[in-house]
Amino acid sequence: MLSSDALILAIFLVAAVNVARYISTLRTLLMVMRECDPLLYQMVDGRGFFSSQGNVSKQIRLFHYIRSHQYDNHHDEIFIVKCEKVRRLFVIAAFWVIFFFVAIVMSL
């Protein structure tokens, strides 16, 4: 039988891996976006999405773009697939992070 600390560590590791997958896929999406839709890329990134000087309003614009499925009518199939993957991984990563914090609270 696993101790609660080992279980919390396992949940944390799964959450960390899923967040890393999400960030990696988001970086790939931005690279694809730069090539297939430079105007959209400038609207949501503009140098520095992952930097401390990143424009938060542009990051939120990308979040709303993906959340509202605005990419469905895009001309590039690869871009649509990447957006779907980012959306799916965001949901999975958010679930695991929330589950991690609930597990911590429940173990107290």
Image (cartoon, rainbow, N blue to C red):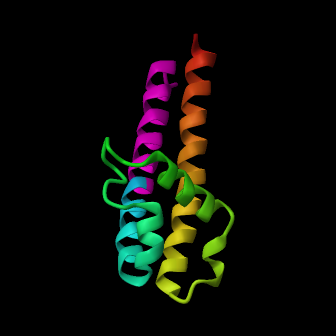
Give the residue at the far top of this rendering. 108
> Could you tell me which residue is drawn at 40 percent across and 61 percent down?
45
Whether 4 is drawn above or below 51: the answer is above
Indicate the position of residue 38 as horizontal and vertical percent values: 40, 77
> Looking at the image, which residue is at 51% across and 63% down?
86
Q: For the stretch drawn in magenta, what is the main secondary structure?
A: helix
Q: Quadrant of residue 30?
A: bottom left
Is residue 16 within the magenta segment?
Answer: yes
Give the residue furthest to the bottom: 75
- Depth order, front residue of 22/56: 56
Instruction: Give the answer, above or below, for where 79 lies relative to 55.
Output: below
Where the C terminus falls, by quadrant?
Answer: top right
Query: Is residue 5 found left or right of 101 in the rendered image?
Result: left
Q: Is 5 above or below relative to 77? A: above
Q: Nearer the viewer, residue 40 or 4?
A: 40
Q: Is residue 17 magenta?
A: yes
Q: Position of residue 27 (x, y in %)?
A: 36, 62
Instruction: Answer with left or right where residue 52 lies relative to residue 108.
Output: left
Counting from the top left corner in percent of width and height, residue 100 is at 54, 31
User: Which residue is at a point 47% across and 65% down the rendered structure image?
Assistant: 43
Q: Does residue 103 lie above or below 19 as drawn? A: above
Q: Quadrant of residue 26?
A: bottom left
Count up the numbered dots: 0
Image x and y of residue 61, in percent: 56, 57
Which residues make up the magenta segment? 1-22
